[in-house]
Amino acid sequence: MSDQGSAPGVYHASADFIANAHIDADGYARMYEASVADPDAFWAEQAQRIDWIKPFTKVKNSTFDYGNVSIKWFEDGTLNVSASCIDRHMLTRADQTAIIWEPDNPATPSLHITYRQLLENTSRMANVLKAQGVGKGDRVVLYLPMIPEAAYAMLACARIGAIHSVVFAGFSPDALANRINDSEAKVVITADFAPRGGKKTALKSNTDKALFDCSDRVKCLVVKHTGDQTTWIEGRDVDVKAEMAAAKPYCAYVEVGAEDPLFILYTSGSTGRPKGVVHTSGGYLVYAAMTHQYTFDYHDGDVFWCTADVGWVTGHSYIIYGPLANGATTIMFEGVPTFPDAGRFWEVCAKHKVTQFYTAPTAIRSLMGMGTDWVEKHDLSSLKLLGTVGEPINPEAWNWYNTHVGKGKCPIVDTFWQTETGGHLITPLPGAIGQKPGAATKPFFGIKPLVLDPANAEVQTETAAVGVLCITDSWPGMMRTLWGDHARFEEAYFSQYRGYYFTGDGCRRDEDGDYWITGRVDDVINVSGHRMGTAEVESALVAHEAVAEAAVVGYPHDIKGQGIYAYVTLMNGVDPTDALRKELEVWVRTEIGPIAKPDLIQWAPGLPKTRSGKIMRRILRKIAENDFAALGDTSTLADPSVVDDLIDNRMNRG
Ligand code: 6R9
């Protein structure tokens, strides 16, 4: 993008791009105004982008009043999400590629799956699930590599009205067991192994371990993907590919209510227990489809690539549901950016003539460090637009992305959103909104952001403001509840700032009304774009017999954005050795998964606590950041001397 706008530091799409874009600046202003002035009329029209079985007569019905929070959209309409993503394209694009599967190993051929094949395979998978007794409302846990069967399984659940819960394949057996149990799933679908970056994760064996802690009734459906040997429990384990081959190639879809759940996705909060975010069918699909079209300026014939994993919400909304509802060609990539070399992303872009490329800042930062040769080697002329998601992007990475990947001609959409929001909340719509490196800029249609002063909960009315980010009113794509715990849902999101949805993020609004997300203000940290509750890591650490107490904070990390910094107090008499430090790292990896491994462990003879026993994380964060001058008031601590000890030891950390 060239810096040619009204103000320095503002980047605009080219005249050509704007001429072909779905929306320009005036269009955005008009449409945004309409979306907030009359949400019922606006969303009734937008909802026509998907297929309804029984049309809705009610549009929005929601309240954010604490104690009474209820969110419903299109509540008396019925539909089937898989029919809207597949069947309705049969007349117009049955032979168009729906999914391009790009395997971990570039020597393995990629697959082009047409909408017709997607219908057949989703149907076969749906029939396999039905044969296992899975029906409407039942929960199915998916613990899979990035393979086509993951897409078939998600859509098959939607087809029969079952609720899927995808668990990222990097999570541990314990984390998997917790999710199977919390959702009371009937079935878990896994694979023998997950190849990634040339290594293989033993998913089946992880699932075996997880199922030790689950009901005997949970069936285990196994996709034999690599074909390597695994254990097999007769009567419990089912060979998915064999069953799919024998199943009928068509399965009628089930009519579900707009407010029937489509999926549960567990995400980290500020307490130890992950939250089962529930998304429903109608509103979610409308919002995923609409944001996919406008944010990425998606047009027929484009090849869209979101590099996320379907284990995260980004994979749900922008690999599967949004693109397929729009009849798009979407890429599903099994591998990692650096295998077999640091040019893999760009090789795949060239190979499949990708038009929109959507990734995380952490990936950009790690590739940036490996030089530009890897990018220059590949023909990136098909790219029209770039996107980022998951964390704030630093201007240096933005500039590198713009110059070396976008060649200065691709708008960059910095999309701010969350598992809870279902789709983009704040993002520069290309062609309509000027981009500023590091800013998510302006709200999507129907989103009314507010900046509140965290000290007194006052709404900041000046354009330029700093505070916490809340949203005034509901939109179709937002979550409806936490699985089995509506009280926790209200407590977590609607109790701090009454009447509003609280994102958990801090933000700054500049003089132009552009939003800059500054990061979480709660005890959630963002490691390589993945959400991690510090309490989750702490409870894993204290579960080790040598650990008496632990406090975990984030600290700035060049590649990951934030790293995991753990202060650990050992049991009396235990020696703080390097071997123990290693052991604790491995311990956390096994308890939660590799993404939770602490980057630094500091032995802490004592932790700074208030007289009421609350750990003062603010102080621990400052010490982790080496910012000793900004510790603030330590006089309220029960024992202020622990702080000096921690500062002394900070120098000796591992
Ligand atoms: C989609 C996704 C949500 C948290 C969110 C915020 C951070 C996401 C961002 C961003 C700055 C962006 N976040 N996108 N921060 N700029 N463009 O990432 O969902 O895993 O639930 O994480 O990620 O802190 O609150 P999720």
Image (spheres, rainbow, N blue to C red):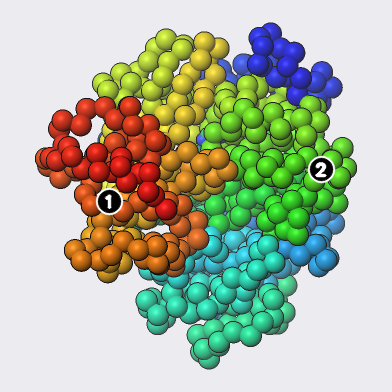
The amino acid at mark 2 is Asp
Write the residue at 30% across / 40% down.
647
Report if residue 280 is visible in the image.
Answer: yes
Decide which of tag 2 and tag 1 comes sooner along the chain: 2
Write the residue at 70% across / 19% down.
11
Write the residue at 21% across / 43% down.
642
Q: Picture coordinates of residue 328 (x, y %)?
A: 75, 46
Find out whether the residues at labels 2 and 1 contact each other: C-beta distance under 8 Å: no
Q: Residues within 10 Å of mark 2 (few under 14, many from 20)?
A: few
The dot on residue 373 is 2
Report if residue 333 is visible in the image.
Answer: no
Q: Picture coordinates of residue 481 (x, y %)?
A: 38, 47
Q: Answer above or below: position of 335 versus 520.
A: below
In the displayed structure, does residue 364 sit left or right of residue 636? right
Q: Picture coordinates of residue 579 (x, y %)?
A: 40, 67
In the displayed structure, does residue 43 sit left or right of residue 596? right
The amino acid at mark 1 is Ala
Q: Which residue is mark 1?
A: 604
